[in-house]
Image (cartoon, rainbow, N blue to C red):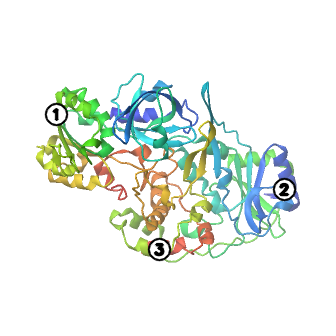
Amino acid sequence: MNLYENIIKNNNHTETPSPYVPVMGTVERVTRVTEHERLFVIAPSNKELLNYCPGQFYMVGLPGYGEAPISITSGPGQEKEFEFCIRAVGNVTNALHRLRKGDTVFIRGPFGTGFNLEEMKGKDILFVAGGIGIVPMRSLIKAVLNDTKSYGRLSLIYGSRNPDDILYKEEFEEWKAKGLDMRLTVDKPHPTWKGNVGVVTTLIPKIEVDPARTIGVIIGPPVMYKFVILSFRDKKITDDKIFVSLERRMKCGVGKCGHCQINSSYVCQEGPVYRLKDLHSLPEAI
Amino acid sequence: MADKLLKKENLGKLIESVLGKGGRFIAPSTDARQVVFKAVAKAEDLASDYILARNSYKEFLFPQTEVVAEFTVGKDGVDLRGTDVNPKDTVIFGSRPCEAASLSALRAVFTWDFIDEFYTKREDKTVVLTVACTKGDEACFCTTVGLSPETKDGSDVYLKETESGDYIIEAVTDKGKAFVEKHAAVFEDGSATAKPLFIPAKIEGIDLDKIKERLAKTENYADPVWGELTKKCIGCGACTFVCPTCHCFDITDEGTAFEGERRKNWDSCQYENFTLHASGHNPRDFQHKRWRNRFMCKFNYYPNKFSSKGCVGCGRCIRVCPVRLDITEVMEAMSK
């Protein structure tokens, strides 16, 4: 539970008078990852922003364009810079895609709950990511793979639309070498694709699961959750051992503006990472 | 004990005294043939015959639009300046008891985790002078939500009109006492008889506990009755803008990529864009879901999360609704 205490401490920015004023960040590197996504390495002017947990997010913006909520994708413990993988889909994210090395961005955060790594220790973890759900998942995977001794079996099921959309391909060998059992699937294969075809739930029955010692983590597009949850239930993983990260439109990041609300819960503060059991009282969630 | 009185002929002096000390005086005043809360400079500007101002005075604590930061991007880099909030002393005169009770709801959301000083600093500098209701209309339903014209929650000074048009004043809070002392020259000792208050009848068939109980059950969430009750809603959002407890806002950058400002603007959960993701997915994809959200915010989420009033029964949303969607009719249906 120490992790949550840290988050709460992080959120009390007493030294920052206004929660709406961003910190400036310098773009150090931009890498084109796929047709739609770019990876940005950013150095914030205030190093306190680097004190984040996997699962948290930042409001990343550009002067004159506004902000968008973006999950952290680098592993924790960074000292100089952090990474965001951004899909060009809206006004702000398309503008961000035009940035080059040396440009300035506005950043506020980190916001929200992170994954509770302490609770995952000693357990098998089954990560299920769909689409750009792999972006926040990578931060968690990196944290876990840095300390594999502390965890049990680690498995990742990652589904993409087609082989070109798969993110972080170049890191997969390293992840496997560190002990991650990786299973990929695509909806629309190319003629050269030799892997699985179909939605992520087609792979879940193939994973051996000991429900007493398994934690499930789901991050993906909204439509994916309920199907993966059903598959997890087939595997007898109980809802108190399943964690999900939810996506919502966000504006303030500090639990005031109302945009991200799921029933009584402010996703920007009480989420985006939820224990599935806690969502039983929030019917709007999934 | 003698009462403390504010004579009607001294109202102008009170305004002068407030303005003279650098403050602003907000009161119901006629504008485009409607009575609205606005800044006034003399007693003649005050509306004398009104039930409730058309707008809520929340806009003087939480403006429709306000700058929270400014930026300039030049050759030498980016200059970013957060806005300091230095609000003027503000007097709200002619609040009704229902609306005064809404301030604790606004304060709760602006302070529950991060502190939003744009709100708190303004509220700290605001003194609410409530004039108890001597008349009302069929939209008033404060007694149905557990308030009444006798409620003093949120009022710093509570005033009752007398037959001769003067006011009997009662300082309720320390802030109210300090206000009365500060402007002592304007008030007089005396005795007078207050006009009888207008107490709206409690709407039979509405039971807040039953509403809460029903809303708390997740199996009722997808009840088709929501679609039936609210299908005439056109999603204009007027109810949320006049509501004294609605507080949702947007943050946008205005100007160019080189020079501009970041603003907080009122927003409404009744709009489709409010929850629309850039991907096109919308968690509240139909109007009845947005209406349900507002209703549940008032009668379930807010009371449970902040234990403060989500709805104060002022009836403004009923008066402005262009399709006559009456929240009390939904409350009645939800009491079953």
| Marks 2 and 3, how far apart at CA | 55 Å
Numbered circle sitting on residue B231: 3
Query: Crowdedness of circle 1 by 10 Å Cα count: few (<14), some, many (20+)?
Result: some
> Hey, what amino acid is under mark 2?
Asp
Instruction: Using the rendered image of the protein, determine whether residue A253 is visible from the camera's viewpoint.
Output: no
> Is the N terminus of chain A in the top left, top right, bottom left or bottom right quadrant?
top left
Q: Nearer the viewer, residue A32 or B268?
A: A32
Q: Pointer 1: what residue? A: A152
Closest to the camera, between mark 1 and mark 2, is 1
Which quarter of the figure has residue B87? Answer: top right
Numbered circle sitting on residue B294: none
Numbered marks: total = 3
Q: Are marks 3 and 1 in contact (CB under 8 Å)?
A: no
| Marks 3 and 1, how far apart at CA | 52 Å
Q: Pointer 2: what residue? A: B189
Chain bearing mark 3 = B
Chain bearing mark 1 = A
Chain bearing mark 2 = B
| Marks 1 and 2, how far apart at CA | 79 Å
Query: Crowdedness of circle 3 by 10 Å Cα count: few (<14), some, many (20+)?
Result: some
Which quarter of the figure has residue A152? Answer: top left
Residue A75: x and y in percent read: 33, 30
Instruction: Using the rendered image of the protein, determine whether residue B325 is visible from the camera's viewpoint.
Output: yes
Residue A244: x and y in percent read: 30, 46
> Is the C terminus of chain A in the top left, top right, bottom left or bottom right quadrant?
bottom left
